[in-house]
């Protein structure tokens, strides 16, 4: 091979090697300049994928709980409604969530059978007229919004039940008013302390009529400094309803009452910030939220 050709071939190889080195240098510079942006894009994409997976898992748990464990699901739903329906601080909301989660894991009590006294009273209410023409109404009728509440808190030796309660007899509307304080954890409006509300407060006009939720007998008519004038009705089967802060009692101890019968007048006796009815519902000593039963049929 001529010497001139050898020289030209060496020069061509040198130029090609220089081109490869230049390309490598440019690639290194590009990676050094844009490599962080590429890493950021990868991190953001990974974050989105993880979030989508988390949402998918939560949805799976939601629908799985609803299908496989309807009672705990209903309990969580009621706790959510209670939290969202009240104006509470974050500490109260968290305490309510924790307590609801603990109650979901607790065994659900069997629903009590309808007692013979309830059956007899139910038959009588179908033939006897009552003072409340709208006794079949299942929720407190709405009026102008009011903030009247009571100061009663749950004693330490009693407990709340957040599982739903089922009663075979439809509840009558207890009073014409609006719910001013819900069931469960709240700040006591009188003492300002955090405590458990064993029932619901329904704000109403002074002197408004109070009606019995279910048929039964008057277990007790009394007064104390917290509940004011109050009535306890025994509906049989361990089911007790109480009506507090009344201005006037219209029934006597031992008297039989029908569902929707007028039993008292709204007042603000005892610890109260205004005229209202404090309504409680207990089954075998446990306090249950009466509001879902008042919404029956909605």
Image (cartoon, rainbow, N blue to C red):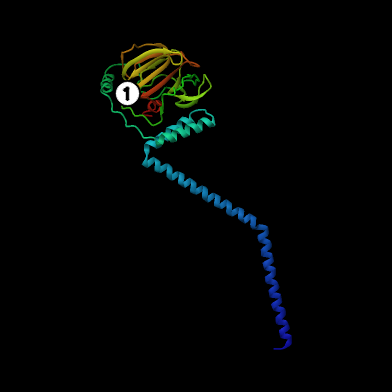
Q: Where the N terminus falls, by quadrant?
A: bottom right
Say left or right for 186 vs 214. Answer: right
Q: Which residue is depicted at the point 50% across and 33% down?
A: 94
Residue 93 falls left or right of residue 171:
right
Q: Nearer the viewer, residue 42 or 190?
A: 190
Horizontal and vertical percent position of residue 178: 45, 22
Q: Could you tell me residue 113's position as x and y percent?
A: 28, 28
Q: Is residue 40 above or below residue 11?
A: above
The quarter of the displayed image where residue 69 is located: top left
State which quarter of the image contains the C terminus.
top left
Disc 1, SS: loop
Q: How many marks?
A: 1
Which residue is at 41% across, 12% downward?
A: 223
Classify 10 Å Cα crowding around label 1: few (below 14), some (14-19), many (20 and above).
Answer: few
Relative placement, left or right, of 132 versus 197 is: left
Residue carrying label 1:
238
Foreground residue among 7 and 185: 185
Furthest toward the front, the residue is 157
Q: Position of residue 164 (x, y in %)?
A: 38, 31
Instruction: Tell me: residue 71, above or below residue 58.
Output: above
Across and down, in percent, residue 187 comes to 51, 24
Q: Quadrant of residue 235?
A: top left
């Amino acid at each position: 091979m001529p010497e001139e050709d050898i020289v030209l071939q060496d020069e061509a190889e040198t130029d090609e090697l220089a081109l490869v080195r230049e390309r490598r240098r440019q690639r290194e510079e590009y990676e050094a300049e844009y490599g962080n942006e590429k890493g950021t894009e990868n991190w953001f994409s990974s974050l989105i994928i993880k979030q989508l997976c988390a949402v998918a898992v939560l949805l799976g748990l939601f629908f799985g709980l609803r299908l496989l464990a309807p009672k705990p699901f209903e309990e969580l739903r009621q706790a959510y409604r209670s939290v969202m329906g009240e104006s509470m601080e974050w500490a109260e909301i968290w305490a309510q969530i924790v307590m609801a989660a603990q109650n979901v894991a607790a065994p659900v009590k069997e629903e009590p059978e309808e007692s013979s006294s309830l059956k007899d009273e139910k038959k009588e209410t179908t033939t006897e007229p009552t003072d409340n023409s709208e006794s079949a109404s299942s929720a407190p009728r709405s009026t102008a919004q009011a903030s009247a509440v009571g100061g009663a808190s749950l004693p330490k030796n009693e407990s709340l039940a957040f599982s739903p309660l089922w009663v075979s007899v439809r509840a009558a509307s207890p009073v014409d008013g609006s719910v001013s304080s819900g069931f469960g954890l709240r700040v006591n409006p009188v003492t300002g302390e955090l405590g458990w509300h064993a029932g619901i407060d329904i704000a109403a006009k002074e002197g408004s009529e109070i009606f019995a939720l279910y048929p039964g007998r008057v277990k007790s008519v009394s007064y104390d400094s917290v509940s004011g004038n109050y009535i306890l009705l025994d509906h049989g089967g361990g089911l007790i309803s109480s009506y507090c802060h009344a201005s006037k009692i219209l029934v006597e101890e031992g008297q039989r009452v029908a569902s929707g019968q007028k039993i008292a007048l709204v007042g603000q006796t005892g610890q109260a910030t205004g005229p209202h009815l404090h309504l409680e519902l207990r089954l075998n000593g446990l306090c249950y939220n009466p509001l879902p039963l008042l919404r029956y049929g909605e």
